[in-house]
């Protein structure tokens, strides 16, 4: 079983729709969580950190559920430019290792 | 300011040859990570440096892979006797972190390695 699992998608949704992804992690010692965005043939870039209390950045909302060991990303009013692969990341600082999920591919259609 | 840079951007080599990949992290970043990403796959952790030391080498897939970092800055990833399954994009990232895993990582553009 992978330490961080994501639905690979693709999610194909119309512009303006709301879309949500979940990501599960298996290591209960994981302490820090992030969502990265990766465009085709480009490097990953940080989208947002995920805080225990949940956090929002414009159209993007990230939440953490420690009891069930998953994090989520919600995108509201999706734009064509949101089309990308979204990578979930969990890390446990004591091991100094960051685990990336395989990514969820999102495609926004006009 | 300058981001993470990697060279070469593309490398085509023949099976059995050695290759060396270079990463220049953001100035002042103490943590440096190497990952590889095969087509359509997620990132596979290879090795992590804190300063010049590598507290975690667990991700290196075989003893053909080695990495070093000098002066707390530039890092090189060496793959000896390359195999076709080594073909992937090799990504380097750096962060300010003094204890790994909690800070934002900034990625370089990667080196696309093709082993014929």
Image: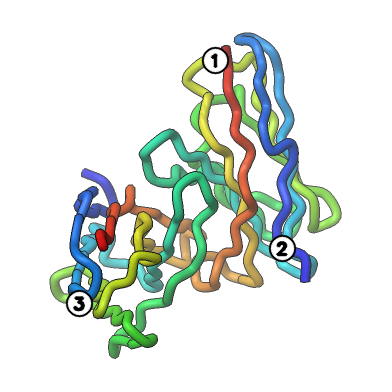
Instruction: Name the residue: 19% across, 62% down.
Output: A13
Neighbour tally class for label 3: few under 14, some 14-19, many 20 plus, Cα within 10 Å: some
The quarter of the image holding the N terminus of chain A is: top left
Residue at mark 2 shares a chain with residue at mark 3: no
Q: Dot 2 corresponds to which residue?
A: B3
Instruction: Name the residue: 24% across, 79% down.
Output: A76
Instruction: Name the residue nearer the viewer: A74 or B93.
Output: A74
Farthest residue to the right: give it.
Answer: B71
Give residue B21's quadrant in the image: top right
Evaluate if marks 1 and 2 touch, with contact meaning CB atoms under 8 Å apart: no
Q: Dot 1 corresponds to which residue?
A: B83
Question: Where in the figure is residue B23, as x and y percent of width and height?
Answer: 73, 47
Instruction: Name the residue: 44% across, 56% down.
Output: A38
Question: Where in the figure is residue B73, as x and y percent of width and height?
Answer: 80, 56
Name the mark nearer the viewer: 2 or 3. 2
Question: Where in the figure is residue A52, as x and y percent of width and height?
Answer: 30, 85
Q: Is residue A64 left or right of residue B28?
A: left
Name the mark nearer the viewer: 1 or 2. 2
Q: Dot 3 corresponds to which residue?
A: A65
Q: Chain of mark 3?
A: A
Evaluate if marks 3 and 1 touch, with contact meaning CB atoms under 8 Å apart: no
Q: Chain of mark 1?
A: B
Instruction: Name the residue nearer the viewer: A67 or A110.
Output: A110
Is B73 above or below relative to B67? below
The quarter of the image holding the C terminus of chain A is: bottom left
Question: Where in the figure is residue B78, as x and y percent of width and height?
Answer: 69, 30
Instruction: Name the residue: 20% across, 55% down.
Output: A11
Farthest residue to the front: give it.
Answer: A110
Of the two numbered discs 1 and 2 on the same chain, state the one appearing first in sequence. 2
């Amino acid at each position: 079983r992978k330490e961080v699992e994501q639905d690979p998608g693709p999610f194909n949704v119309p512009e303006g729709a709301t879309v949500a992804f979940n990501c599960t992690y298996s290591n209960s010692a994981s302490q820090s969580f992030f969502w990265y965005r990766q465009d085709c043939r480009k490097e990953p870039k940080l989208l947002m950190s995920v805080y225990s209390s949940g956090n929002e950045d414009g159209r993007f909302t990230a939440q953490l559920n420690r009891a069930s060991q998953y994090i989520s990303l919600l995108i509201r009013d999706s734009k064509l430019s949101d089309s990308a692969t979204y990578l979930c990341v969990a890390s446990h600082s004591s091991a100094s290792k960051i685990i990336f999920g395989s990514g969820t591919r999102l495609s926004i259609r006009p | 300011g300058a981001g993470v840079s990697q060279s070469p951007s593309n490398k085509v080599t023949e099976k059995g040859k050695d290759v060396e990949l270079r990463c220049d992290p953001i100035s002042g970043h103490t943590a440096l990570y190497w990952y590889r990403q095969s087509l359509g796959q997620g990132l596979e952790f290879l090795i992590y440096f804190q300063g010049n030391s590598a507290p975690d080498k667990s991700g290196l897939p075989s003893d053909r892979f080695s990495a070093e970092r000098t002066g707390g800055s530039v890092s090189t990833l060496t793959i000896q006797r390359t195999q076709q399954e080594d073909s992937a994009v090799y990504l380097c990232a750096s962060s300010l972190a003094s204890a790994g895993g909690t800070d934002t990582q900034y990625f370089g553009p990667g080196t696309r390695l093709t082993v014929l």
